[in-house]
Amino acid sequence: MRRCVSRKTGQTNSTEATDLFRSASSKASSKEMERTDNLFYSYANKSSGLIDPEGIESLCSDLEVNHTDVRILMLAWKMKAEKQGYFTLEEWRRGLKGLRVDTINKLKKALPELEKEVRRPSNFAEFYSYGFRYCLTEEKQKSVDIESVCELLDLVLGSQFRAQVDYLIEYLKVQTDYKVINLDQWMGFYRFCNEISFPDFSNYDPNLAWPLILDNFVEWMKEKQT
């Protein structure tokens, strides 16, 4: 009989410990959520309930980064923010939970790790595509104007492919055939920078499925080199 009682007592203690752990974890999680939400509302517009461009400016100031810093775009990517210049509470929670932060100081310290995460090849193509889609500010918009594309190219690819990006931007600004760029062309720029030998273009084959704008760019570059 004593053995039977002992087992039951052990099971009870184990269950109580598990329940206590769950309760403590739940309380900690609730506190983190509360801090995350309070931080959101410290930047949010009271009437819209969103962090708007003005709120993002304040956030950037507290993070000590410029609002044009690529890490702000990376933060938007982490949140899966849908509308440029705005963060919803749900997006904010998603991003901060993913970064495991709930204060502005923790967020500031997390930015270098976020950049490393984005720069991984497995993530960067998705981030690069996101950067373009984030610029589609109007309903049913499918293309981005040349000026904005040049700024975005410099922001997201400039540090990795400086020479290619500089020449691409120069070409885009002087050519007159295209006023806007679509997603297929945008992704072609990234593939081009990754795959094509530069500046000799020795492995570039115009018969392959490259966007026509890149055929034109290569021709323009070769004319400059002669």
Image: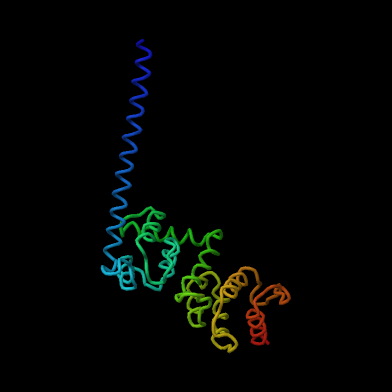
Q: Picture coordinates of residue 36 (x, y %)?
A: 31, 56
Q: Residue furthest right?
A: 207
Q: Position of residue 21 (x, y in %)?
A: 33, 36
Quarter placement of the N terminus: top left
> Is 61 above or below relative to 24?
below
Using residue 53 as the reference point, say whether residue 223 is left or right of it.
right
Q: Is residue 100 left or right of residue 192?
A: left
Q: Position of residue 68 (x, y in %)?
A: 40, 73
Q: Is 47 placed left or right of 180 in the picture?
A: left
State the count of labels: 0
In the foreground, 226 or 135: 135
Nearest the viewer among 99 and 196 is 99
Q: Residue at x 36, y 64 (%)?
A: 88
* 30 vs 221, nearest the viewer: 30
Residue 177 percent location from the top left of the image:
60, 87
State whether residue 125 is above or below residue 142: above
The quarter holding residue 82 reads bottom left
- Residue at the spot 31% in from the left edge and 45% down from the top edge: 28
At 61% across and 72% down in the image, what residue appears?
188
